Amino acid sequence: MIAILAAATTSLIVSLFGTPIFIRWLVRRQYGQFVRQDGPTAHFVKRGTPTMGGVVILLAMVVGVLAATLQRGRMPSATIWLALYLTLGLGLIGFLDDFTKISKQRSLGLTPIAKIIGQVFVGVSFAILAVHFPNANSRTPASFRVSFLRDTNINLAYWGVLIGLLLFVVWSNLLITAWSNAVNLTDGLDGLATGVSIATFIVYMLVGIWQSNQSCQFMSAAGPGCYETRDPQDIAIFSAAIVGACFGFLWWNASPAKIFMGDTGALALGGALAAVSILSRTEILGVIIGGMFVVVVVSDVIQIVFFKATGKRVFKMAPLHHHFELSGWGEVTIVIRFWLIAGLFAAIGMGIFYAEWVVS
């Protein structure tokens, strides 16, 4: 538990005090945000606000994980290395996208092909590595089984290991793409994606703690409701580091934002969410825990599909938060209410997780 607190506290301090230093550096370099011309007109005043704040979130997260590692006195597990790899890998793609926008003075960054190639490489390599590195109990960080609250009976390796690996790569990359795009779409108002991420990763921190206390790997905790997760405490540490980093960043990202996380932060946080859901064996439960992200994506999909089918729009503008903006809601009002809904989704997800253990 001390290691988890060390991760959260250290990342919070680094993010809280490191962000203003990064803001001043960005301002001197004139690295500001470009605003889409077809968006809400109220956003035009945000043009020039420093972006790429995800760099600070990632730095704070890494330092937090290192602090927890030093406190425990042992090297990080394969699970935490994999989570860091996916998060930092997608964060690098987001950074290149942000930097391209800034350096070329345009609102579009990397080409779609370049982004896809980068995401596919990171996602595929993560998936392949995740089903390797068994520990002393022969447990790998991820499994070939589709998971809800734990691994289900849906075994992707039913027809053999090679087919199972192929199906797992496809399944994992579906989750990675969905979550990274979900966070990216949600990052449209000051502090919105940051606050929703805090609620989501707090629950995953608690899930990791609970799985650690009820792990099948320890005889004292083993029982009918124990969990097969390889390194649950490391999942809690990783999630705690993200929570602390986002808390510190939110101080500067809340309305009126002094800095935006950019694609650097959005893609990285989406990758982190995919990583913890896969590595904690709660892939489908993650849809509930991160339900606010899902609602935003669904609103965008509905808008696109309905417009192509009928030529009409369901919402005044998608994603959903822009619809409420154009309906006259204040930005702060939208953000706070979305935070509340995100907290409700996270609480429901945690409640389902705990209720299943009680019943089992």
Image: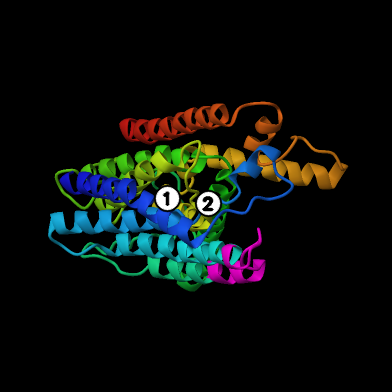
Question: To which quarter of the image does residue 145 belong?
Answer: bottom left
The quadrant of the image that shows the N terminus is top left
Residue 215 percent location from the top left of the image = 24, 47
For discs 2 and 1, the disc positioned in front in the rendered view: 2
For residue 149, side relative to residue 357 (left or right): right
The residue at 41%/30% (across/down) is 347
Per the image, the residue denoted by label 1 is 277
Is residue 275 at least partly visible in the picture?
Answer: no
- Badge 2 vs badge 1, beta-carbon distance below 8 Å: yes
**120 or 105, which lies in front?**
105
Q: Amino acid at mark 1?
A: Ser
* Secondary structure beneath label 1: helix
Residue 58 percent location from the top left of the image = 38, 57
Q: Is residue 61 above or below residue 81?
A: above
Residue 89 percent location from the top left of the image = 45, 66
The residue at 51%/39% (across/down) is 192
Q: Amino acid at mark 2?
A: Trp
The residue at 25%/62% (across/down) is 77
The CA distance from mark 2 to mark 1 is: 10 Å
Residue 298 percent location from the top left of the image = 64, 42
State which region is magenta: 102-120
Per the image, the residue denoted by label 2 is 179
Is residue 184 at least partly visible in the picture?
Answer: yes
Instruction: Say few, some or many: other residues with alpha carbon within 10 Å of mark 1 (under 14 / 14 to 19 / 20 or more).
Output: many
